[in-house]
Image: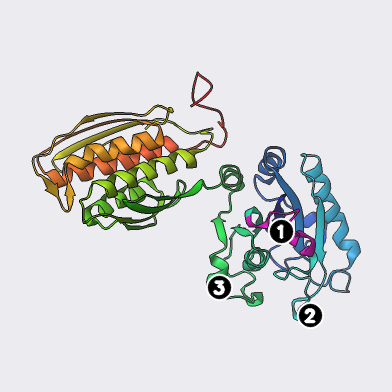
Amino acid sequence: MKKVLFIDRDGTLVLEPPVDYQLDSLEKLEFYPKVFQYMAKVASELDFELVMVTNQDGLGTDSFPEDTFWPAQNKVISAFEKEGVVFSEVCIDKTFPHENAETRKPRTGLLTKYFDKAEYDLENSFVLGDRITDMELAKNLGAKGIFLSEDPELGADEIESSKQAILDCIALTSTDWQAIYEFLKLNDRVEEITRNTNETKIYIKLNLDGSGKNNIDTGLKFFDHMLDQIGRHGAMDLTIKVDGDLEVDEHHTIEDTMIALGKLFNKALGNKLGIERYGFCLPMDDCLAQVAVDFGGRNWLEWEAGFKREKIGDMPTEMFFHLFKSFTDGAKCNLNIKAEGTNEHHKIEGIFKAFAKAMKMAVKRDANKMFLPSTKGML
């Protein structure tokens, strides 16, 4: 199925004339900063069909004669074609807002053919635009929005859905075409896993490119607190739900959770193109924690951290080594962990925070260096 970029014209590809919002002469034509450079990359490197969708209020009436519209429009199309950017379709609605036409954004009357689920993948398609109505169009299509928001209230008088429902569809807000290109190229790495055994029932969802939003419940409060460090300090979104045999002891819950989380990391990293691969050392009061990682495809754990207490919170300290070993087995990575200090809580929390920072560093990608960081040719 084809993915589509539905792209607004005014305020997105070209700068919208500030007085009357009407591009009716070549003198008013000014292109959006960096749009050629990065639209050319989008067209040549990414697998999207490009569709221009634009409202042109009253086009063909006395207030906006067609002969004033087409010279600038044709210049826009020609300029992009010379950069290798070709629109498969240009959809223009000519009505006024008060006409409530089904063809006018945010309505989808001009785009009905794209609802063909056998041909188009709207769930992984995007609408790029500078008005909140463009974002509502994304919602109405079942796509996601990229909001070039110079003025967040622009078009607010025409929206038909709740504002929150529209905001929930926005995947990126940026006025920088480089950031838009990198977002489209690197799209979020989101995976989930369900792992059920006679001892534990586990569900985990991971977004490696999130913002630290977590929803964690393993039945062990201190374990939840430590897993929360991974999401928060690693800038990852984590949903973890575990129903384990805590009536036996904590072992199976901790071990199986980390095996599943490790496997999920490995799955989310995919082909590993462009990742930094390696990654942290940080202090926490009296403690110095060091965690080095290599997502090189080989599991190994070096551990230099001792604990004098039998438990911290509701977690046995003997499980700390084992949980990181379980993670390396699932993630196929190498971990080298060291910690020194006097406060046992600080020591293990410092390790988890350093682990989170190491993960964040290692999974980071560079959109301009999408090659495998290995001389072997595989990870």
Quarter of the figure with residue 112: bottom right
Task: Determine whether, in the image, residue 225 is placed left or right of residue 364.
Answer: left
- Res. 244 mark: none
Q: Which mark is residue 99?
A: 2
| Left/right of residue 268 with respect to residue 43 in the rendered view | left
- Mark 1 lies on a secondary structure that is loop
Disc 2 is placed on an element classified as helix
Of marks 1 and 3, which one's residue comes earlier in the chain? 1
Residue 233 percent across, percent down from the top left: 33, 47
Q: Which mark is residue 163?
A: 3
In the rendered view, tell whether residue 228 sits above or below residue 305.
below
Q: Which residues are magenta?
A: 111-123
For the residues bearing labels 1 and 2, Cβ distance under 8 angstroms = no
- The answer to whether residue 172 is seen in the rendering is yes
User: How dense is the environment of label 3, judged by Cα within 10 Å: few (below 14), some, or many (20 and up)?
Assistant: few
Q: Which residue is depicted at the point 37% across and 45% down? A: 234
Residue under numbered circle 1? 8
Q: Find out whether residue 116 is within the magenta segment.
A: yes
Return the residue nearer the eye: 11 or 50.
Answer: 50
